[in-house]
Amino acid sequence: MLNTEINKDSGAQNSPDELSQAAASDESAENEQSGEASAALGVSGRSDDRQDDGNTDKKSFAHTFFDVAELFIITLFIVLGVTSVFFRHSIVDGPSMMNTLTDGDHLIISDIFYEPKAGDIVVCYSDQLKKNIVKRVIATEGQTVVIKNNEVYVDSVKLNEDYVYIDNNRYRYQDGQWTVSDGCIFVMGDHRNNSTDSRSELVGEIDTRFVIGKVVMRLYPFSKFGSVD
C-alpha cells in the first residue's frame, strides 16, 4: 500500500532531467526576449544617431555657406572701395579710336601719380565739347607738332604710328603745325580722318588739369579684356 502511494506521487512530479530542460527553455526564452529588446533599442539608437548627424551636417553646411557669403560681400566692398579710389570706369563713345578701341568699350583708367606722356591713351574732359573724350597723347608742353601728307612729326621726328586707322572713303585729315602750350597736351584719335581732337578748334590742346586718367585696361567686351596700347 505504501509503495503504491509513493509511485502515484512520483508519477505526478517531473524528473530532474525534465526540470533541467524546462529551466533551460525558460532561460533561453528570456535571453531571446532580452536580445530582441536590446536589438530594438540598438536600432532605435542608431536611427537617432543618424538623424542627429544629418541635422548636424545641415547646420554645418548652412554655417559654412553664410560664412563664405559674408566673406564674399566684405571682399566685394573692399575691392569696390579700392577701385573707386585708385581707378575709374569710362565708356568709349564713338569711332574716333578705331581700331584700337571701339564704340561701347568699357575702360579702366587711373590717374595715380600720372603725368601724361606721348603715346598714352587718355580720357580727358573737353571744355569746348562739354564731355569726356578718349584720345592718344601725341605731344606734351613745348613740343611742336607738324602734320603733312597724313604723316605726323613731333619736333621734326616722324612718328611710327602702326596703330593709326584711316578710312579711305572719308576725307583726308588736314595738314598743319601746332606748338603745345605749357601745362597742356596735344591729342589725336587713332581713326585719323574721323576724329575731333586737338587739330580742331572745337577741342584744341588739352589742359593737363582736365586729364582724368590713363587707360590701363579694357574691361569689356570680355573677348578683348586686357591691357590697351
Image (spheres, rainbow, N blue to C red):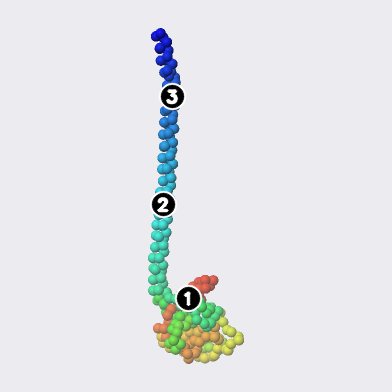
**Which residue is depicted at the point 42% across and 80% down?**
212
**Alpha carbons under labels 3 and 1: distance apart:** 96 Å
Q: Nearer the viewer, residue 192 or 224?
A: 224
Where is residue 207 drawn, in percent x and y? 42, 86
SS under mark 1 = strand
Q: Is residue 194 above or below residue 56?
A: below
Q: Which kind of residue does numbered mark 3 sit on?
A: Ala
SS under mark 3 = helix
Q: Nearer the viewer, residue 220 or 227?
A: 220
Q: Nearer the viewer, mark 3 or mark 1?
A: 3
- Residue 208 occupies quadrant: bottom left
Q: Is residue 120 visible?
A: no
For label 2, the residue is 55
For label 3, the residue is 22
Where is residue 22 drawn, in percent x and y? 43, 24
Would you call the spot at circle 3 few (<14 residues within 10 Å), some (14-19), or many (20 or more)?
few
Q: Nearer the viewer, mark 2 or mark 1?
A: 2
Q: Is residue 33 above or below residue 83?
A: above
Where is residue 115 drawn, in percent x and y? 42, 79
**Which residue is depicted at the point 48% across and 78% down?**
91
SS under mark 2 = helix
Would you call the spot at circle 1 few (<14 residues within 10 Å), some (14-19), or many (20 or more)?
many
**Alpha carbons under labels 3 and 2: distance apart:** 49 Å
For label 1, the residue is 107
Q: Which kind of residue does numbered mark 1 sit on?
A: Leu
- Label 2–label 1 contact, CB within 8 A: no
- Label 3–label 1 contact, CB within 8 A: no
Q: Which kind of residue does numbered mark 2 sit on?
A: Asn
**Alpha carbons under labels 2 and 1: distance apart:** 49 Å
